[in-house]
Image (spheres, grey):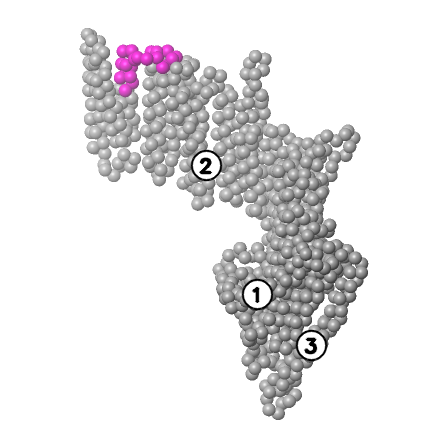
Amino acid sequence: MLDFGLVLLGLLSLIFLLGVPYLLISHMRLKAQVRALEARVAAQMAPPGSAKDALVSPPVAELADPPTAPGDQAAIKSGLPWGERKPMPEAQVPEKPSEASKSEIRQLDVQPPDEAVPPRAFVLRQDRLALLVQWMRDNWVLVAGAASLALAGVFMVQYGVENGLLTPFWRVMAALGFGVALVVGGEVIRRRVGDETEGAAQHLASALAGAGLVTLFAGVLSARILYGLVEPGMGFAALCLVSVLALVLGWFYGAFLTALGILGACLAPFLVGGQSQAPWMLYYYFALISVVGLGVDTIKRWAWISGLALLAPISAACLLYLAGGEAPHFLAGLMVIAAAGVIVPERSLFPRHAGRAVVQIFQFGAGARMYPEFPTRISACVTGAVSGAALLVAVQADQAAEVVFALGILVVLLLATLIWMRQAVALFDHALLPGLAILALILNEGFNAGPLLQEFHAALQRPPETAPPQTIWVLMAIGALGSALAYLRMQWSLRPEAETEVDRAIYWAVCAAVFAPSLMLVVEFTWAPVAIHGTYTWALAALLLAAGMTFGAERCARGPQVAKPALRVALFAIAALTLIAFALFLVLSKSALTLALAVMVVLVVVIDRKYDLPTLAVFVQLGVAVITYRLVLDPGVFWALDRDYIDQDWRYVTPLWQVLLAYLGSLGLLGLGWRLARGRREKTALVLESAAVTLAAVFLSVLILRLLPEEMRHGHAGMGLLATVWTACLMNQIYRISLSGRVSTVLRGVLALGYGLAALGSILALFVFANPLFSYAEFTAGPLIFDSLAAAYLPLAAVFAGAALRLPGRWGWLRRACVVLASALGAYYVSLEIRRFWQGDDLSLPGVSDPELYSYTVALLLASAGGLILAFWRRSDLLRKLAMAGVVLTIAKVFLVDMSGLSGLMRVFSFMGLGLALVGLAWLNRVMNAQWQKRPKGNADPAN
């Protein structure tokens, strides 16, 4: 095995000893010829009699063509599907530039693209795809021939295996010899007729040399994977030598050779087949292919070759991993590809990508959408590929070690994006990808009970006096480190020498203020760390993070007053307050926690009032939402009304004083916050007011249900009082809509819809399920008039009457509806009281007695008379008409209903009384008409 490795290295070394110097010498000759041509052209362009001036380069502004843009450099020469790079006209070719001109040209080369034109170095474009299809149609025979030659080298090895014609050593040597012959043949053709020349030999050299490279790769891989003739280290060294040969050839040949070599080299391991004890080497082999492709394209600037050099190796590595490959080497190989994707296109060990970032594509302005430069997009793609691969490994992992390794890769990638890429202004957004992947990995472990979470929860069964696992603290350290580095990036962007990065300060402030708290909340809601480390330890960790966020807020307040310092202070302050609230969640009881949140909301309003930090309104809205959620849903109404069977009786579990403290305390604090915010922060005041009204309605409902006796709690009295509460909230929001702006109107409309649904449900329950007139289970209670019927209907009627009086004129139809509803509720209450007077507490008994029937008539007469008197007092023609309608209704009732049940003197005196009453009402109506006719028209009541 060692002898074969030495022979292989010797053969490849011979190729490089002879081939590389030859290529370099030929390259130097070409450079000398180009310089001679430039001197001749410069001499021809110089004015007559000014030979000295011919040695001086013209100014950059006078050059015939400006420096080529990235898209022009990415264009491919004639015959390839992405167009031809236009040569300079001979008469306008400039002479060799001076040093000053070179520096000016370099400055032009690094300038960002014109703001009106996006960068042109696109790979996936419709026109280029059309050109590719056209080129394949014209050159499909050449492509098929090159593929056949490459497959011939691969099948040479396989045929020897299947038929046993040669020993493994000679099979590999035959493949390597065939590959060398193809490379040499291609080089001979290129030296004689060229590669991208016009004519029958176009791309023939690339086809032969590309097939030869694929055969060399297949031969070396078969020596290691198929036969085990060489050790992994020696095999990898041989692959490196072939890769260097491919890199050098790619600089002298066209894009066809590079594309054929990349695709063939990526397919070679799958075509060779076989079983190997060290398949991990293939991941680094794919990384080598990617480096070679990027290295060729960094000189040629074809752009699409870089895309192919990333897509093909990454895809091959993913297929190998999904087929059962080793996760650590898979991720390590992708990390090498990612590093190459960042370093090689820019040819700089430390990234210095300029221009726009990828995230800025989604910023819509007045002009056309701007795109980042091609190297920036390459860097974003490889960063996203590594992040996605690490997440894939963690999702499919069966062991905690694989999850830890994937998490470690993401942490390394996060550190690289935050520290290594800090000088590349166009790569500032790359930290989002590993950061989000870290959060997704932790979330996936918690939701799906991954191996790392199972190992963590196994500590519940650990022996006494055994330290718990430190997994949670490692995760928290990752979160704290990410936020700290993002904070440092924010501080670096505020330095005077980093003027172009000042606008990034807000971005880094958001990252620093969000990453660590988000990670902690994800761990809390999916990992249950309290079960392992205890409540107070976990709460202390939250407070430590809050202290760090407070430090960030203080530094932003005292730092340079640029890049919206108030907003940055508010971001860190919101993060600190959120963590403090989270710590309170952990250690306080339900009512104490709600009060603590309300106190924090008031303190935030006070801080905003003193330091003018409008962004803190976000925390106020979140805090109010959490308080409302706690007092309404969880624990909310169920906590306040929870009962248990204790000592042979149903009793409330939560004491009344705790309910009063939670609701009244929160209402008082929200009211204080509303008073402080009113006039300064209208939206904040609106949120506080709406929450206070909602919570007041909920509290009154809870109080009614707790204070009413057991038999009245869910009867007509309870339902009526609940309907009163929610109807009052509805009318309050409708009244406030007319005084609000656009945003407030939308919010109040949503609240009014919710209150309306609650009120409608309560009213339907009152008249359908808890109606004492129809339900046999409903009994009235209390003294006459001041009984459960009054509690059920009179407050609700009063709310509708108040709304009819207080609603603005724009709600005229609603005011009339409220008048009708209030009158109907009042009449229904009086009717039920009359029935109770004659029937007793059970109003659902069938039949109507004569005295009850006559009482309704008397009530109608009295109501009509009262309506006429009120109409005369208010000079309202509408009320007078309603009163006369009551009179008509009374007459109809007497003649159609009452008369059939009367006889004798009772009939005589009844109709006598009715007649006298009607005569009196008619006289009163005429008096009113006479008085109103005497009044001047100018004094007419506008309400009539």
Please give left or right for residue 387 compared with residue 855 in the image: right
Q: Residues within 10 Å of mark 2 (few under 14, many from 20)?
A: some
Name the residue rendered at 51%, 25% in the picture. 702
Q: Residues within 10 Å of mark 3 (few under 14, many from 20)?
A: few
Q: Nearer the viewer, mark 2 or mark 1?
A: 1
- Residue at far bottom of view: 49
SS state under label 3: helix
Q: CA distance from mark 3 to mark 1?
A: 28 Å
Q: Residue 26's mark?
A: 3
Q: Residue 751's mark?
A: 2
- In reply to whether residue 201 is colored magenta, the answer given is no
| Kind of residue at badge 2 | Leu
Name the residue rendered at 78%, 63% in the picture. 7
Are the residues tagged 3 and 1 within 8 Å (C-beta)?
no
Q: In the figure, 780 relative to 318: above or below? A: above
Q: Quadrant of the C terminus?
A: top left
- Magenta residues (range): 837-860
| Kind of residue at badge 1 | Val
Q: Which label's residue is closer to the chain start, 3 or 1? A: 3
Measured as percent of width and height from the top left, residue 131 is found at 51, 66
Q: Nearer the viewer, mark 3 or mark 1?
A: 1
- In reply to whether residue 842 is colored magenta, the answer given is yes
Q: Is residue 76 visible?
A: yes
Please name the residue that numbered disc 1 is placed on: 143
Are the residues tagged 3 and 2 within 8 Å (C-beta)?
no
Q: Residue 806's mark?
A: none
Near-viewer residue (207 or 451): 207
Near-viewer residue (855 or 416): 416
Measured as percent of width and height from the top left, residue 852 is found at 30, 13
